[in-house]
Amino acid sequence: DIVMTQGALPNPVPSGESVSITCRSSKSLLYSDGKTYLNWYLQRPGQSPQLLIYWMSTRASGVSDRFSGSGSGTDFTLKISGVEAEDVGVYYCQQGLEFPFTFGSGTKLEIK
Amino acid sequence: QVQMKETGPGLVQTTQTLSVTCTVSGFSLTSYGVHWVRQAPGKGLEWMGIIWGDGSTNYNSALKSRLSISRDTSKSQVFLTMNSLQTDDTAVYYCAERDFDFWGPGTMVTVSS
């Protein structure tokens, strides 16, 4: 199985600051079609996960442009430009290249 | 608009079989697949499996021997069945649309002896 490893944040983060969340995969997620099959989600407290980014860097419908995704085949970053109170929760990366799909362990964001 | 909702038994005894239903609206099960994902209390997300629009399935190998996903397209329902339950199967069970754009609110299942 592909292992997804996420970094931590130096919580709490001051409101308005920009943060980057890292994720690394044990295998390249770049497929022959040119797409990198890496998703990012935010799970707010008590809620279902919400898709933020797919194909490593494409924002999902309705997602604020404060969220951006980047990376290579195995190293990925989710950047949040100017964190706000509504950004609080746990962020997960997930690979969609091969079964079983696997998630990182999550990165918690708290805001000061 | 797309809506998904899980319904489950709430409490199940160990060694028994779990049945959870996902009822969808706003899209056709013959066009889009549905995933099952679970989350143990205070833990991360675990992908369980998917039933595709053509009715084929893929399962997490860690669960494959106990897990079955099926559907009734006429009722827009997808079913998760898992046998030989243990206490570590206690979790919130989510269904999600093929592209993970839409998720249900989840249903909490507690496995108790």
Image (cartoon, rainbow, N blue to C red):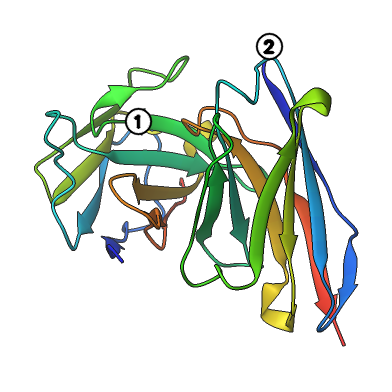
At x 33%, y 17%, the residue is A65
Is any part of residue A54 visible from this angle? Answer: yes
At x 18%, y 30%, the residue is A35
- Would you identify the image quadrant in which residue A48 lies? top right
Give residue B4's mark: none
At x 83%, y 27%, the residue is B75
Q: Please provide percent x and percent y for residue A10.
A: 31, 58
Q: Residues within 10 Å of mark 2 (few under 14, many from 20)?
A: few
Residue denoted by label 1: A53
Do callouts 2 and 1 mark residues in contact (Cβ within 8 Å)?
A: no
Q: Residues within 10 Å of mark 1 (few under 14, many from 20)?
A: many
Q: Please provide percent x and percent y for residue B69.
A: 66, 51
Distance between mark 2 and mark 1 Cα atoms: 21 Å
Q: Please provide percent x and percent y for residue A75.
A: 14, 50
Quarter that holds the N terminus of chain B? top right
- Would you identify the image quadrant in which residue A81 lies? top left
Q: Nearer the viewer, residue B103 or A33?
A: A33
Q: Chain of mark 2?
A: B
**Is label 2 in a helix, a strand or a loop?**
loop
Q: Nearer the viewer, residue B27 or A73?
A: B27
Looking at the rendered structure, the kind of residue marked 1 is Ile
Residue denoted by label 2: B1
Looking at the rendered structure, the kind of residue marked 2 is Gln
Q: Chain of mark 1?
A: A
Instruction: Please tell me whether residue B13 is drawn above or below residue A7 in the rendered image.
Output: below
Q: Is residue A35 left or right of residue A6?
A: left
Quarter that holds the C terminus of chain B? bottom right
Instruction: Please tell me whether residue B92 is drawn above or below residue A53 in the rendered image.
Output: below
Disc count in the image? 2
Q: Are marks 2 and 1 on the same chain?
A: no
